[in-house]
């Protein structure tokens, strides 16, 4: 399917032709830290099927194994856009699902790194869910981030 996406400020945008059956939820510790969230959803796409507008900043993550991965994000607003191989032209971009406009239609088919998953990640359906942010008394008097 054809998708579009952009960072929060709009300086970087993309279109891509993706396989919607390939969405992954990753619970690894690096995804938790980079995303600031308990897990991250990722959509791997061949690089030649992605048209990018704008210039992301690259941070190269070096794993304990020595594996080097580019983490691409918007230098203006910090939105994470994708990860890719660090050496040579990238073959595969792991798009961050959060910046994809059609993300509601892109249901994950697998979860990985369960070893570091939050023990409560699978129990969220049982937690009270308000339609909007400030309805919960737990949010008062704090402003949402
Ligand atoms: Zn931006
Ligand atoms: Zn991960």
Image (cartoon, helix red, strand yellow):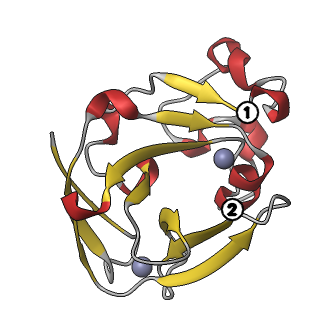
Q: With 6 as the anchor, is 136 left or right in this view?
A: right
Q: Secondary structure at mark 1?
A: loop
Q: With 67 as the anchor, is 57 left or right in this view?
A: left
Q: Which residue has dot 2 on it?
A: 34
Quadrant where the C terminus is found in the figure:
bottom right
The image shows residue 88 at horizontal and vertical percentages of 46, 78
Q: Is residue 77 above or below residue 104?
A: below
Extreme residue toward the top, this view: 126
Q: Is residue 127 visible?
A: no
Q: Is mark 1 within 8 Å of ligand 2?
A: yes
Q: Which residue has dot 1 on it?
A: 113
Q: Is residue 92 above or below residue 77?
A: above
Q: Residue at position x 57%, y 72% from top?
A: 70
Q: Residue at position x 50%, y 34% from top?
A: 24
Label 2 Cα neighbours within 10 Å, binned few <14 / some 14-19 / many ≥20: few
Q: Residue at position x 52%, y 67% from top?
A: 85
Label 1 Cα neighbours within 10 Å, binned few <14 / some 14-19 / many ≥20: few
Q: With 117 as the anchor, is 25 left or right in this view?
A: left
Residue 118 versus residue 109: which sits nearer the camera?
Answer: 109
Quadrant where the N terminus is found in the figure:
top left
Which circle's residue, 2 or 1, is located before the other in the chain?
A: 2
Q: Is residue 101 above or below residue 66?
A: above
Q: Residue at position x 70%, y 71% from top?
A: 61
Residue 16 versus residue 32: which sits nearer the camera?
Answer: 16
Snapshot quadrant of residue 105? top left
The image shows residue 93 at horizontal and vertical percentages of 40, 59
């Amino acid at each position: 399917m054809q998708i579009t996406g952009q960072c929060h400020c709009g300086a970087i945008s993309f279109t891509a032709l993706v396989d919607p059956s390939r969405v992954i939820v990753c619970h690894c510790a690096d995804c938790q830290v980079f995303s600031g969230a308990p897990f991250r959803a990722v959509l791997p796409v061949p690089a030649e099927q992605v048209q990018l507008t704008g210039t992301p900043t690259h941070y190269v993550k070096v794993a304990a194994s020595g594996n080097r991965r580019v983490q691409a994000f918007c230098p203006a607003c910090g939105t994470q856009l994708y990860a890719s191989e660090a050496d040579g032209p990238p073959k595969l971009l792991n798009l961050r699902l959060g910046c994809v406009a059609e993300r509601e239609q892109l249901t994950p088919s697998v979860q990985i790194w369960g070893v570091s998953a939050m023990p409560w990640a699978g129990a969220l359906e049982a937690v009270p869910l308000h339609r909007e942010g400030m309805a919960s008394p737990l949010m008062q008097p704090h402003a949402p981030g």
